[in-house]
Image (tube, rainbow, N blue to C red):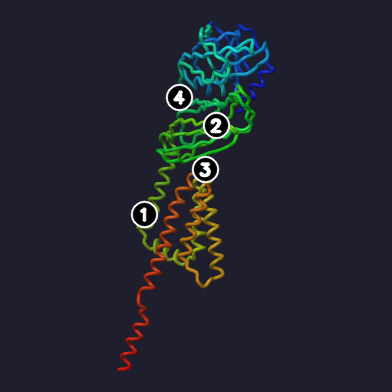
Amino acid sequence: MKRLSAIVVAFFVLTLATASGWWGNGVQVSETDSTTKLTSNSTGIHTAISPKLPANETWNVSFEVKSSVSSLLVEPAYFNGTKFLFAKSPVPVSLKTSEWGRVSVIIPSEEKAQFSALVFIINGTGTVEVNDFSASKAKGQQTSQTQTGTLQPTAQKGGISNVTGSNSDIIVTVILNGTYKSGGTLRADFYITSREKTFTRVDISLKVYYHGIKVFSYSHPSWREYRPGKTVHIYKESRLPILTPPGRYELIFTITPEGGTPLTLTAEIQVKPTIEWFVLVLFFVGAIVGLIYVLIRHKWVLKNAFRWYSKLSIGQRFVLYAVIGLSTSALILAAGAENLANDVAIFVYYLLLMGVLNLWVEYFEPKRDNPELRFGFSLILIGCLSYLSRDTLMKYPAFLLWLLGTALIVKMVLRSIIDKRKPSTPSTIKNIEGLKQSK
């Protein structure tokens, strides 16, 4: 999708309609009586401009709207003749809805402009119907440009989830759907407006919590020119794994302008299961139950497996863990959980590293080598590497590895202390036999 700034550039080459008509950029406009139809026939973002109004007045624009497009936003825009100047913060109106919703938007006055209008930002294909579009002077609501941050529609339909916040540096609106399906694409649109400073970088981070447990995190810088009063549109898309558990998720966005104050916004989404989700869950549950049944029913399989495993060295065991992890990563990737598959692949790399290091030690056969002690230290080292990877899901197994490694080391130390305190059984037997012979 093109950035909103690209749309703004397109306005400079437009020849706007007269003050009594609409104008479409990639949108087909048709007017019948009091209803205006805005039709978009191609994917991407397109715009339509409402009839122009004198910019020296503050206007209360009211209209009814229903649409069949993916998403719709409106924003006040300002012009000098046919030249576009700038636009204010966008207002989310609706997603796909077959019902009429009444929307009211304030267009503040602007001394630098001759005309003002509403810009309809249309995402995707479909038709937007605008009915009973009217503008009246809003007395006593003269507002300067720097004081206008958030415009509120009186109605909002279609399940769109949006949050708006501001601080001394920026005004941000985050728009995303309220409901998603497992395996679907989660898309978040960011509309960022700088207040007084010009920024060239804004850092955006996301933390996702499921029942209070952090399950995903993301951080990425946005290199754009954020000028005062200019709204920049950027977006992030991420495919949800098919195995995503259903339920409500809390999303915490942190937007930090370069050298400025961070702004935190919180939203909630709901994930619903699909038929594919039920099929995959049943498949994995069936596979686990079948494996347990084979191991319990056929004891010789389990017995031979333990016998074979006990003959492996510590290095060979870590390589075996890596092979199992690599196969698991491939299955998870096939299920559509790309992020989880990447986490497992990183963990497999650590297992291979420990396997190679242990095989290297075993090759030289040091005299004071203790395999069990070496295994415990290897687990602790893998836990440290997993924790330092700064990946959300890698931190949970890190604590488990620390506990297992520490338990093995403590066990070895206690066994060594107990063995030193016990009397030597062979020497005691020899002393008894010597006494018998002397008699």
- Camera-side mark, 2 or 1: 2
| Residues packed near mark 1 inside 10 Å, few (<14), some (14 to 19) or many (20 plus) | few
Element at label 4: loop
- Dot placed on the residue nearer the N-terminal end, 3 or 4: 4
- Dot placed on the residue nearer the N-terminal end, 2 or 1: 2
Quarter containing the C terminus: bottom left
Q: What amino acid does circle 1 point to? A: Tyr
- Where residue 277 appears, x then y in whole percent? 44, 39
- Dot placed on the residue nearer the N-terminal end, 1 or 4: 4
Q: Is residue 139 left or right of residue 259?
A: left
Between 43 and 270, the one nearer to me in the picture? 270
Question: What residue is shown with label 1?
Answer: 293
Q: Which mark is residue 159?
A: 4
Q: Which mark is residue 261?
A: 2
Which residue is found at the position 57% from the left and 31% from the top?
260
- Camera-side mark, 1 or 4: 4
**Label 3 to label 4: alpha-carbon separation:** 27 Å
Question: What residue is shown with label 3?
Answer: 339
Q: What amino acid does circle 4 point to? A: Gly
Between 84 and 424, the one nearer to me in the picture? 424
- Where residue 173 appears, x then y in whole percent? 52, 25
Element at label 2: loop
- Dot placed on the residue nearer the N-terminal end, 4 or 2: 4
**Label 2 to label 1: alpha-carbon separation:** 58 Å
Q: Is residue 305 above or below residue 346?
A: below
- Dot placed on the residue nearer the N-terminal end, 3 or 2: 2
**Label 3 to label 2: alpha-carbon separation:** 30 Å
- Where residue 46 appears, x then y in whole percent? 60, 21
Q: Is residue 269 above or below residue 63?
A: below
**Label 4 to label 2: alpha-carbon separation:** 31 Å
Between 270 and 41, the one nearer to me in the picture? 270
**Label 1 to label 4: alpha-carbon separation:** 46 Å
